[in-house]
Amino acid sequence: MRPAAVLFDCDGVLVDSEAVANGAIADDLTERGWPMSLDAAKLAFMGTALPDMVPRIESHLGQKLPPDWPQSIVARIIARYDAGVLTLIPGAQEAVEAVAAAGLPMAVASNSGRQELRNKAGIFPFFSRFEGRLLCFEDVERPKPHPDLYLAAARLCGADPRDCVVIEDSVTGARAGVAAGCRVLGFAHETPAVDLLEAGVAEVFTSHAALPGLLGIAPVGAAR
C-alpha cells in the first residue's frame, strides 16, 4: 500500500479555497451579464483551469472577454485570500506532516495559476514540507484533466507515476490522475463520492484522518 510518492491537489484538498475562488468568479460573471450563484460557479468550474474557463464563458456571453480577464480575476481572487478568509481543509496539515514523517516524497499539482498557488503557499507555512515541488497549470503544456501535471509531479519526486498516489477532490483532477497511471484516492469533500468513483478513483475517503491508513503509513504522533 505504501506509495513511492504522494501527489496532492491543492484547492479543496489542502486549502479550503473553492468557495473563495468560485465566489469571485460568480461575482465577476454576474457583473458581465451572466447571473451566477456560488453553487452554480462551483458546479460549472470546480477543478477547471482558467484557460479552459475562457471559451466556455465567451460562448455563454456571446462575446469575447477582455484580454486581461485572467489577470483581473486572479487579482480579485487573491484580494479575497489576502483579506484573511482562506482556511485549511480540516486535517490537511496533519496528513501532510504524516507523509513527511514517513519519508515519502510529496508534490502539489494544482490547476490554479502560479500567482494563486504561491499566494496560498505563503499564507500557510506547512507548504514548506513540499520542498518547492509546487506545480501549477502554467508549468505544463495542458492542465487537468490531461495527465501532464501529475506526470510532471511524479518526475519531480523521482518516482514512476504507477507507483504514486494522487489525492484529488474533483472529477477533473481525478481523471488527470487516472490518465497519468497513478492510484487516485478521492476526497469527497464537496464532490459526491459516486462522481469520484465514476471518474476512476481507487477509493473514496471523507476525512484526512483516514489518509495515513490508506497510504500505509503512521498518523502524526503515532508511536514508532
Image: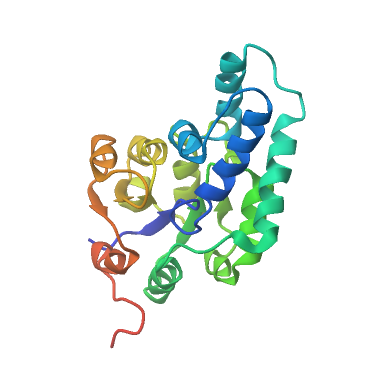
- In percent of the image, x 27 and y 66: which residue is there? 210
Left or right of 102? Residue 137 is right
Total numbered circles: 0
Indicate the quadrant where residue 13 lies: bottom left
Residue in the foreground of this view, choosing between 73 and 8: 73
Left or right of 188? Residue 34 is right
Residue 102, x across and y down, in percent: 36, 74
* Quadrant of the frame with the N terminus: bottom left
The outermost residue toward the bottom is 223
Residue 112 appears in the rendering: no
Residue in the foreground of this view, choosing between 136 and 64: 64
Q: Is residue 94 above or below residue 169?
A: below
- In percent of the image, x 52 and y 36: which residue is there? 37
Q: Is residue 88 above or below residue 118?
A: below
* Quadrant of the frame with the C terminus: bottom left
Residue 105, x across and y down, in percent: 44, 63
Chosen colour scheme: rainbow
Residue 82, x across and y down, in percent: 70, 59
Residue in the foreground of this view, choosing between 215 and 13: 13
Q: Is residue 156 above or below residue 23?
A: below
- In percent of the image, x 66 and y 47: which residue is there? 77
Residue 181 appears in the rendering: yes
